[in-house]
């Protein structure tokens, strides 16, 4: 038998149960992966608390790295014993082993550790599509990223700086401001002390920024709109503080703002997109332009503690679960 974290009801961290599951052999197009490290993401909380409902009981977890132990019929570009990683698809990474569609897996190149791969896939490919496809950041841009000391935020800060942009980032504490600055954020703003709209206006001399990357949601959304330059983009890619209510289109008229609600699953919806995104990410990490900061590690069996600490904003950077 294989151990996994499953939920039988939605709710707090206490609904997560470490229990035996039957995995079985891979079917056509599938791979059996033995996890060596598992990534933690906010979407795991949304699955656990029911914001994004799953049929119950169900394992959770969207990201992992490990070794292929068996392959089903029809899988041609992977091999047994290969190191692989993934992000997305059907939840189930909070497990010792799992079956997964082989076309969701990418080979982990030499020079990238399993722990790094588990920590970078979802957050790193999110940063990739935000910076390179949702709004193509270019040299000379000044951008705003909320939660700049979080997993996605630290990657965005580094990558945007490497692209030649100036980065403004919001954080909740002085410690997180220092961390964000160390990772490429030129102007960290502690929101408990400063109004970020006023600071953005001061930095940009009233012009605003061409793009705001907002994963916070309801707590920042209205003020994010005030920071955007004419024909700028608000990319709302998360909602850690809660969902944003419906927005009248007239709200966007004054400056012709483009509002988008992107997700990794729409940007990497094809095998070709997934491979291109992961290669860009691996390249940025191997070049040293982006460093994956793993600040917190928990045993997979104690995943509930990770959920508690992340929800209480006790963590920075990436969180992984180990086996």
Image (cartoon, grey):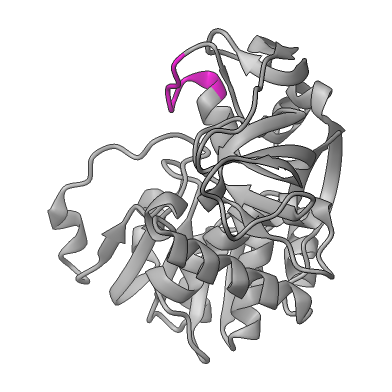
Q: Nearer the viewer, residue 304 or 54?
A: 54
Question: Residue 51: within the magenta?
Answer: yes
Residue 82 x/y as whole percent: 76, 55
Pick the quarter of the image with the C terminus. top right
Residue sitting at x 77%, y 62%: 292
Give the magenta range. 48-55
Main SS, magenta residues = loop
Relative to 87, is 269 on the left or the right?
A: left
Residue 289 x/y as whole percent: 73, 79
Residue sitting at x 50%, y 50%: 215
Does residue 199 appear anywhere in the picture? no
Q: Nearer the viewer, residue 307 or 322?
A: 322
Whether 177 is drawn above or below 285: the answer is above
- Quarter assignment of residue 154: bottom right
Residue sitting at x 72%, y 28%: 95
Whether 105 is drawn above or below 15: the answer is below
Residue 269 x/y as whole percent: 39, 55
Whether 35 is drawn above or below 251: the answer is above
Does residue 319 appear anywhere in the picture? yes
- Quarter assignment of residue 41: top right
Pick the quarter of the image with the N terminus. top right
Whether 43 is drawn above or below 53: the answer is below
Relative to 110, is 122 on the left or the right?
A: left
For the image shown, how many numbered marks are present on the structure? 0
Residue 155 x/y as whole percent: 66, 65
Relative to 124, is 1 on the left or the right?
A: right
Residue sitting at x 45%, y 60%: 271
Question: Residue 241: within the magenta?
Answer: no
Residue with the most extreme front position = 73
């Amino acid at each position: 038998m294989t151990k996994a974290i499953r939920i039988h009801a939605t709710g707090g961290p206490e609904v997560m149960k470490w229990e035996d599951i039957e995995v079985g052999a891979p079917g056509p197009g599938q791979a059996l992966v033995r996890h060596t490290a598992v990534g933690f993401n906010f979407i795991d909380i949304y699955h656990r608390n029911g914001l994004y409902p799953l049929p119950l009981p169900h394992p959770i977890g969207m990201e992992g790295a490990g070794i292929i132990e068996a392959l089903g019929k029809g899988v041609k570009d992977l091999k047994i014993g290969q190191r692989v990683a993934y992000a997305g698809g059907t939840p189930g990474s909070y497990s010792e082993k799992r079956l997964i569609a082989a076309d969701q897996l990418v080979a982990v190149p030499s020079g990238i550790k399993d722990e790094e791969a588990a920590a970078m896939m979802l957050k790193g490919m999110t940063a990739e599509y935000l910076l390179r496809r949702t709004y193509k950041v270019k040299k000379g841009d000044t951008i705003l990223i909320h939660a700049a000391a979080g997993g996605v935020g630290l990657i965005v800060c580094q990558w945007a700086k490497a692209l030649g942009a100036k980065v403004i980032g919001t954080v909740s504490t002085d410690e997180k401001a220092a961390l964000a600055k160390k990772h490429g954020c030129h102007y960290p703003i502690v929101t408990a002390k400063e109004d970020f709209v006023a600071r953005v206006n001061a930095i940009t001399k009233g012009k605003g920024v061409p793009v705001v990357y907002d994963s916070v949601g309801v707590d920042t959304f209205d003020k994010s709109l005030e920071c955007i330059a004419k024909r700028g983009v608000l990319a709302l890619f998360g909602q850690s503080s809660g969902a944003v209510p419906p927005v009248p289109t007239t709200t966007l008229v004054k400056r012709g703002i483009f509002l988008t609600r992107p997700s990794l699953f729409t940007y990497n919806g094809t095998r070709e997109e997934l491979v291109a995104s992961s290669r860009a990410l691996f390249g940025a990490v191997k070049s040293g332009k982006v460093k994956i900061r793993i600040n917190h590690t928990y045993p997979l069996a104690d995943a509930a503690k990770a959920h508690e600490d992340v929800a209480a904003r006790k963590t920075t950077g990436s969180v992984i679960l180990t086996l």
